[in-house]
Image (cartoon, rainbow, N blue to C red):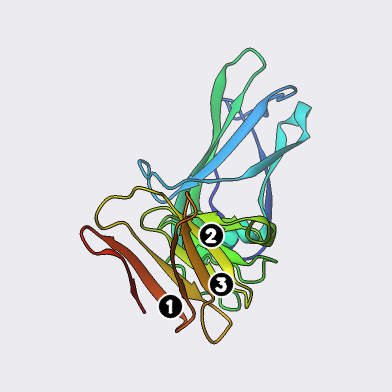
Amino acid sequence: MQLVNLSIDQASTYSKQLVATDSSGAAMDITGYTIKAVAKPGYVSFNAYEFHTTIIDPENGVFEISMDEIETANLPAGSLLYDVKVTSPAGVSTRVNQGKIAVQPAITDANPFNPSQGVRLTDPRVVHIHNNKDVLDNVGSAVVATGAYLVSNGQRIFVDSAALVNLVVPDTVQDGFSFEVFELSEPTLNIAIKTVGNTSIGTWNSSKRVLVVYLSGQGWKFYG
């Protein structure tokens, strides 16, 4: 196994060729193998960032790990740990590389809306959903145009559109069910909220942000 430390720039395309070696340090023949490479903030962290892997020269153990610019934008600045595991056609797994990753923070593409620096407004998207986790889930404009987005409790929804955005909430929710909606580029939000059963909850076009909360005995409340 080789100890190899890496350096990755946020919001930039990254690739690195590595060599799989055995316990003696000799290059392994990885013909027919599968490769998995993952980075984490710590050994037991729930947050994981997986690399794409490509075998370059199997007989000499050469392979490549990579991420595109959107994936590196979701990496938290600072230090991460990573390792690489290869699995033979017979199902035998071997860890062949590990080390630290220094993630250099982005300046040009940094965005304050995501505590992990991840909302990519350069994407051709209308609605961005962030669930207070490191990986950003994007909802494309086609989804919004052809229907409505089903909201989950605790979500933060970022809208980047002048068009009406339709949101749907469950027919039955618990006391305190809430979500926030933010407009990123227009003067005010333009949203309509209904239940799954098509009961209107209300509309909002009074500010760039609204907190929507369900309170038992009072119904749905809008705070903006």
Asked whether 151 or 25 is in front, the reply is 151
Q: Nearer the viewer, residue 121 or 151?
A: 151
Q: How many marks?
A: 3
The correct choice, above or below, for 184 with respect to 82 in the image is: below
**Quadrant in the picture for residue 55:** top right
Which mark is drawn over residue 74? 2
Marker disc for residue 106: 3
Amino acid identity at mark 2: Asn
Residue at 60% x, 78% y: name it: 108
Q: Earlier in the sequence, mark 3 or mark 2?
A: 2
First reached walking from the N terminus: tag 3 or tag 1: 3
Image quarter in which the C terminus is found: bottom left
Indicate which disc residue 209 carries.
Answer: 1
* Disc 3 to disc 1: CB gap under 8 Å: no
Q: Amino acid at mark 1?
A: Arg
Q: Disc 3 and disc 2: Cα gap in Å?
A: 11 Å
Check disc 3: other Cα within 10 Å, few if <14, some if 14-19, many if 20+.
some
